[in-house]
Image (spheres, rainbow, N blue to C red):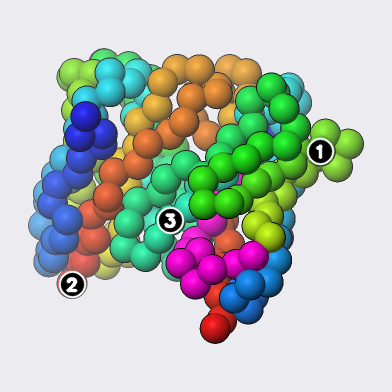
């Protein structure tokens, strides 16, 4: 079985501040982990994914995430928030034999001027 | 490639009416899924398919039917619309490997009066 928990349904930061969105997973086998972003009135698109090639994964728009097996975490970070980063962010997991990703409930990122 | 396309973008129904939400993908993906997105609930899986002729239920299948006669198309049928089915519906597709990215359509915003 696999599951994902995103801590905090809303995260509010000032423009230029560090962005940290938290994701913890549960999987009985080595997982593949994903972060997706959803801008207002759009579908989800891939930000980045962990494929076991490297624990630090860089994605689009300056985002990155680090896979920490000991903490079962895959937190998303960005050093400096921009107004255009305001969106809903979803963490997801797949693992061996699973057909469909399991998604977290999402975290809404609010960026203040 | 058009990716994942959905029609219509918006729809208003009266209680008891039926309709079909269309979904098509041109990436030759084996796996396709339907989700609904409601405020505070994240993405909830309605039905999914792992190939032509094969479908299965997700988390919230009641009131919905699907079929998969071709690789490309995966329509979602609302049998007798209810106000509780007011939501935004997303279709998605991906390859068969755990590492494969899920691609989402732009969504259909459905209101049931």
List x then y, in percent, for residue A105.
57, 56
Query: Which residue lies at the image location 65% right of the left edge and 57% below the top edge?
Result: A78
Spatial separation of the CA atoms under disc 1 and disc 3: 25 Å
Tags 1 and 3 on a common chain: yes
Tags 2 and 1 on a common chain: no
Residue extent of the magenta highlight:
A80-92
Specify the subunit that label 2 lies on.
B
Which of the two residues, B94 or B68, is positioned nearer the viewer here? B94
Secondary element at tag 3: strand
Mark 3 sits on what residue? Answer: A38
Tags 2 and 3 on a common chain: no
Query: Which residue lies at the image location 24% right of the left edge and 60% below the top edge?
Result: B109
Secondary element at tag 1: strand
Q: Are marks 2 and 3 in contact (CB under 8 Å)?
A: no
Mark 1 sits on what residue? Answer: A68
Spatial separation of the CA atoms under disc 2 and disc 3: 27 Å
Q: Residues within 10 Å of mark 2 (few under 14, many from 20)?
A: some
Marker disc for residue B113: 2
Does residue B43 show up?
A: yes
Quarter of the image that includes the C terminus of chain B:
bottom left
Quarter of the image that includes the N terminus of chain B:
top left
Query: Which residue lies at the image location 60% right of the left edge and 50% below the top edge?
Result: A63
Relative horizontal placement of residue A5, taking residue B12 as reference (left or right): right
**Quadrant location of residue B86?**
bottom left
Which of the two residues, A2 or A67, is positioned nearer the viewer here? A67
Which sits earlier in the primary sequence, circle 1 or circle 3? 3
């Amino acid at each position: 079985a696999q599951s994902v928990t995103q801590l905090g349904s809303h995260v509010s930061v000032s423009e230029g501040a560090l962005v940290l969105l938290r994701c913890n997973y549960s999987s009985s086998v080595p997982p593949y982990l994903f972060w997706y972003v959803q801008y207002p009135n759009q579908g989800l698109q891939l930000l980045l994914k962990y494929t076991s090639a490297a624990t630090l994964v860089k994605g689009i728009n300056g985002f990155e995430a680090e896979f920490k097996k000991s903490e079962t975490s895959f937190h998303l970070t960005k050093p400096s928030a921009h107004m255009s980063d305001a969106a809903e962010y979803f963490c997801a997991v797949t693992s061996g034999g699973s057909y469909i990703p399991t998604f977290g409930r999402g975290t809404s990122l609010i960026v203040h001027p | 490639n058009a990716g994942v396309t959905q029609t219509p973008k918006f729809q208003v129904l009266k209680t008891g009416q039926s309709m079909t939400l269309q979904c098509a993908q041109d990436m030759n993906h084996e796996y396709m899924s339907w989700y609904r997105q409601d405020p505070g609930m994240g993405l909830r899986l309605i039905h999914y398919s792992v190939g032509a002729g094969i479908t299965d239920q997700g988390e919230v299948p009641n009131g919905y039917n699907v079929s998969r006669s071709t690789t490309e198309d995966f329509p979602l049928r609302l049998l007798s619309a209810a106000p509780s089915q007011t939501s935004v519906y997303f279709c998605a597709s991906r390859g068969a490997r755990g590492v494969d990215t899920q691609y989402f359509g732009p969504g259909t915003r459905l209101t049931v009066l």
